[in-house]
Image (cartoon, helix red, strand yellow):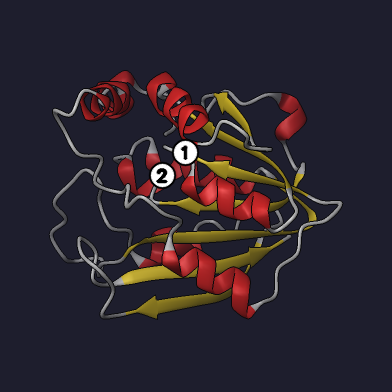
Amino acid sequence: MAAGDDDATGWFEPLYAAAEAGEAVVPWHSGGPTPLLVEWTSVRAIEGWGRRAVVVGCGLGDDAEHVASLGFETIAFDIAPTAIRGARRRFPESAVEYVVADLFDMPSAWLSAFDLVVEVITVQALPDPPRAAAIAAVSSLVAAGGTLVVISGAREAGDAADGPPWPLTRAEVEAFATGGVEAVRIEDLRAQPEPWSRRWRAEFHR
């Protein structure tokens, strides 16, 4: 996950530590890559050979492993050290570079550096503030000619939201189109698995 405000993000590391001890469940971890991400890469025949990808708030690594399997040189980062250790332990032979890092204090070399940026549930797990800043930070990773894919729970602007994580409104998803990043497609998908039976899947290009 991302950091930047201790009150907003301090619960991520304790959550992963409790889950590792068998005392909690990470609500966004399903034990495999996100189906909507797998479908998106399959339908678009995404191939990453010779290109770079980053997975934001990678958790225990399933989405990062899927992205790497497509040929991308993949960096995956999370604010929770326990999550990164867990990902490395689950995938000991992985080609993914798993890194403990803060979305609000990323290495300068990462800015505008990735041909594919994958954001699944991370921004949704943050209140606002600092959610708006997190959205801009995610978009800042996209290289010229690159693609950002965002997957999150969905809600209407006026709907109550229990969280964390909090489903995003369409306006929040549209806000990823910033700093030269433009929306290509925003899908409103229903009948999805719980806990978010309605989800956004959005694609952006720079």
Q: Label 2: state its secondary structure.
A: loop
How many angstroms separate mark 2 from mark 1 (CA)?
6 Å
> Where residue 151 appears, x then y in whole percent?
44, 61
The residue that appears at 54% across and 24% down in the rendered structure is 101
Q: Residue furthest right?
A: 50
> What numbered label is drawn on residue 40?
none
Vertical relation: 121 (above or below) 60: below
Task: Provide the residue designation for mark 1.
Answer: 57
* Circles 2 and 1 in contact, beta carbons < 8 Å: yes
Task: Provide the residue designation for mark 2.
Answer: 122
> Where residue 26 appears, x then y in whole percent?
25, 40
> Where residue 186 appears, x then y in whole percent?
49, 75
**Front in this rendered view, residue 77 or 10:** 77
**Front in this rendered view, residue 55 or 65:** 65
The amino acid type found where label 1 is placed reads Gly
Indicate the quadrant containing the C terminus: top left, top right, bottom left or bottom right: bottom right
Q: Label 1: state its secondary structure.
A: loop
The amino acid type found where label 2 is placed reads Thr
Can residue 3 be seen at all in this image of the molecule?
A: no
